[in-house]
Amino acid sequence: MPPSKPPATPPALSLAERLEANAILDRLVADEPTFATEDARRLIALVPPRRPRRFTLDLGLRRPGTKTRGHAAGRGDVEMEEAGETKTWSSDPARSLKIGGYEVTHVPGTLGIALMWSETRLDRSGQSCSLIYDAVTGAPRELRIARQATIGFLGLHFATVRYVPWKMPRAGGARG
């Protein structure tokens, strides 16, 4: 019998599974040189995989804020400033699960972990990482962290994010 394909969108996790996954995510991204193999295996088992996409397009549009000036009785000249607005669109809207402060994407062989607010930062270095594992055995291979390179040209800025080696797995579930 051929292996079944993962669903296009991941199913929901129970509250207990979300809490467990959040605790594991906190341990994986902690400021340590290694991560526990058992934590990685459990997270891989907890977060349901989805079918990989060949191409995803993410677009963002930023609208500047507005300023209003006037005169208020008893206060004098006043100025009110409204913050700008950013709208984003993706060709793959249901690509991640939100777990605690993280957005997690799981396709066979890779589990992507990003801080939920990472898209609001100009520099995305250190805001996301990828857990690379053997899709057949489920054995974690490494954790890679995002590094951004930005190129400016005629007032436009283009940024690319690549993932570089960060942490290696260690045997055992105990920290240290």
Image (cartoon, rainbow, N blue to C red):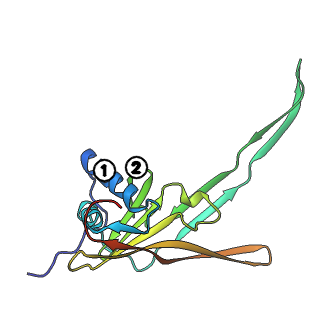
Q: Quadrant of residue 155?
A: bottom right
Circle 2 is placed at which residue position? 100
Is residue 141 something one can see in this rendering?
yes
Secondary structure at badge 2 equals loop
Task: Give whichever of 120, 136 is nearer the camera.
Answer: 136
CA distance for labels 1 and 2: 8 Å
Secondary structure at badge 1 equals helix
Q: Which residue type does callout 1 highlight?
A: Arg
Q: Is residue 162 left or right of residue 152?
A: left
Position of the C terminus, as image quadrant, is bottom left
Residue 18 badge? 1
- Give how far across and how far down residue 37 sits, in percent: 28, 69
Q: Which residue type does callout 2 highlight?
A: Gly
User: Residue farthest to the front?
Assistant: 176
Task: Give whichever of 43, 76 is nearer the camera.
Answer: 43
1 or 2: tag closer to the N-terminus: 1
Q: Is residue 132 left or right of residue 128?
A: left
In the rendered view, tell whether residue 173 sits above or below residue 15. below
Estimate how packed mark 2 is, as few (under 14), some (14 to 19) or many (20 or more) residues with alpha carbons within 10 Å.
Answer: some
In the rendered view, tell whether residue 84 sits above or below residue 76. below
Estimate how packed mark 1 is, as few (under 14), some (14 to 19) or many (20 or more) residues with alpha carbons within 10 Å.
Answer: some
Task: Identify which residue is drawn at 44% across, 59% down.
Answer: 30
Q: Contact, CB < 8 Å: mark 1 with mark 2?
A: yes
Task: Identify which residue is drawn at 77% across, 40% down.
Answer: 81
Q: Quadrant of residue 125?
A: bottom right
Is residue 91 something one can see in this rendering?
no
- Give how far across and how far down residue 110 sits, in percent: 35, 74
Task: Give whichever of 44, 169 is nearer the camera.
Answer: 169
